[in-house]
Amino acid sequence: MEKFKLERRKIIVTAKLKGPETEQFFDFILDTGAGTTVISEDTAILLGYDLSKVTPTETFVTAGGRVNAKMIQLHKIEVFGKLASNFRVSVMPFPIQLLVDGLVGVDFLQKLKKLKIHFDTQEIEVN
């Protein structure tokens, strides 16, 4: 079982990301309403991505409206002990009020057989 934090009615989990220059731990929101995993522009830059050289974009509909996001390949992402290599994520500006570095979307969650959230112990059970 993996621990999570419940903050501002959001489930916060730890994600380990590897980019071209570094590997670090980040706080992500578990977002079953997001089809795609998203990282903030600041997170991408910390990992060593030069966003001025990233050209592929996709348009997403978010709670705030339509957003054009850059798409990058993370070298690695690990959440709940599940590792994915060369994983495609979108990169978007995050409002400072979010206080997180990214969102774990359904594209990553579907790699799990089962995801059970225990709010009483703030643990997530995965298979």
Image: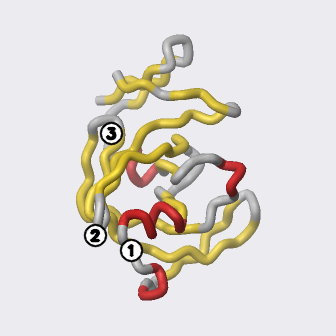
Q: In which quarter of the image is the C terminus?
A: top left
Q: Distance between the residues labelled 1 and 3?
A: 28 Å
Residue 82: image x %, image y %?
27, 41
Amino acid found under the numbered disc labelled 2 = Pro
Q: Looking at the image, is mark 1 or mark 2 earlier in the sequence? A: 2
Q: What element carries label 3?
A: loop
**Residue at the far top in the pictured view:** 120
**Image: 125 above or below 24:** above
Tag of residue 112: 3
Q: Name the residue under label 2.
A: 20
Q: What element carries label 2?
A: loop
| Mark 3 residue crowding within 10 angstroms, few (<14) / some (14–19) / many (20+) | few
Residue 45: image x %, image y %?
45, 69
- Which residue is depicted at the point 36% across and 31% down? 114
Q: How far apart are marks 2 and 3 (CA)?
A: 26 Å
Tag of residue 49: 1
Tag of residue 21: none
Q: Looking at the image, is mark 1 or mark 3 earlier in the sequence? A: 1
Tag 1 near tag 2, CB within 8 Å: yes
Q: Quadrant of the N terminus?
A: top left
Q: In front: 122, or 27?
A: 27
- Which residue is depicted at the point 62% across and 67% down? 93
**Image: 1 above or below 56:** above
Q: Quadrant of residue 61?
A: bottom right
Residue 38: image x %, image y %?
50, 59
Amino acid found under the numbered disc labelled 3 = Leu
Q: Can residue 110 be seen in this view?
A: no
Q: How many labels does the image show?
A: 3
